[in-house]
Image (tube, rainbow, N blue to C red):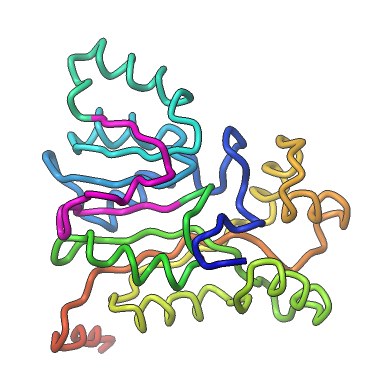
Amino acid sequence: MSPDEPLPHVQPAGARQAFASEEATRRFAKVALLAPGDRVLLLGGCGEAPLVLARDYGCQVVAAAEDPQALQPLQRELEAQALGHLLRVCPLEGALEGLEEGGFQGVLVRGERLYRTREAAERLRSLLAPDGRLGLVALTCVGRSVDPEEQARWEAMQGAPLLGPLALLALLRDAGYEPEAAEALAPAELEALAQAEASEEPLLRAWREEGGRGGVSYALVMGRRREPGERPPMPHDRG
């Protein structure tokens, strides 16, 4: 599988996505310090995020989805509120072509993905404005340990190491970001996702078949674009 091929573990178009809730979108907006007029790029698994970011934050949103037609109801809702100019919908394939470097305050990657996690972090950095934020949903290992056979199976499937949330933050740091936040999907949330979706997406299928005993979940990691030569952040005074 070449690096540009879609990843096999990614949830299919139309499926209910991890971290697709309004609350998760608002957490990303808070970390990204989004303000009216900021441009935000959403790649895959857009859910309600375009509506929330355009209507409630006044952001200019570019939403790239595997099935752009699925976003038409959101487009119509924004148009009914005279906010249609804040949302542009496009196909996921070829979505990055012609985008302005440094043109986005936030980039959120969820659901269907174009690249593996490390490659996505590296490729998308140039699209972010200085101090812009990247949010990435990725597979992660959770708990004290993961069965070696299970870990090997997932690593072979995604063609990359299976990392914990802290290691994913280190990956962002190495790709040119200041790591800011990481959260793994709680077991109850993953259980609800697995039961709500009859999808054969491998993680949800494994969760159902193993009765929720697996050591793999989804994580949302976020980081700020860091510039070459930038001093590290000052340590917090715990005194």
Quadrant housing residue 88: top left
Residue at image coords 27%, 61%: 133
Residue at image coords 20%, 87%: 232
Query: Quadrant of the image for the C terminus?
Result: bottom left
Residue 231: percent from the left, percent from the top? 15, 88
Query: Quadrant of the image for the N terminus?
Result: bottom right
Magenta span includes 196: no
**Direction from residue 175 to residue 158 in the image, left or right:** right
Whether 15 is drawn above or below 144: the answer is above
> Viewer-proximal residue, 234 or 39?
39
> What residue span does the magenta drawing correspond to?
87-109
Quadrant housing residue 193: top right
The number of discs equals 0
Residue 14: percent from the left, percent from the top? 58, 32
Whether 142 is drawn above or below 12: the answer is below
**Direction from residue 135 to residue 198 in the image, left or right:** right
**Direction from residue 129 to residue 187 in the image, left or right:** right
Residue at far front of view: 2
> Viewer-proximal residue, 70 or 58?
70
Residue at image coords 28%, 52%: 30
> Viewer-proximal residue, 99 or 238?
99
Residue 61: percent from the left, percent from the top? 25, 38
Residue at image coords 29%, 58%: 31
Residue 91: percent from the left, percent from the top? 41, 37
> Viewer-proximal residue, 117 or 168?
117
Magenta span includes 108: yes
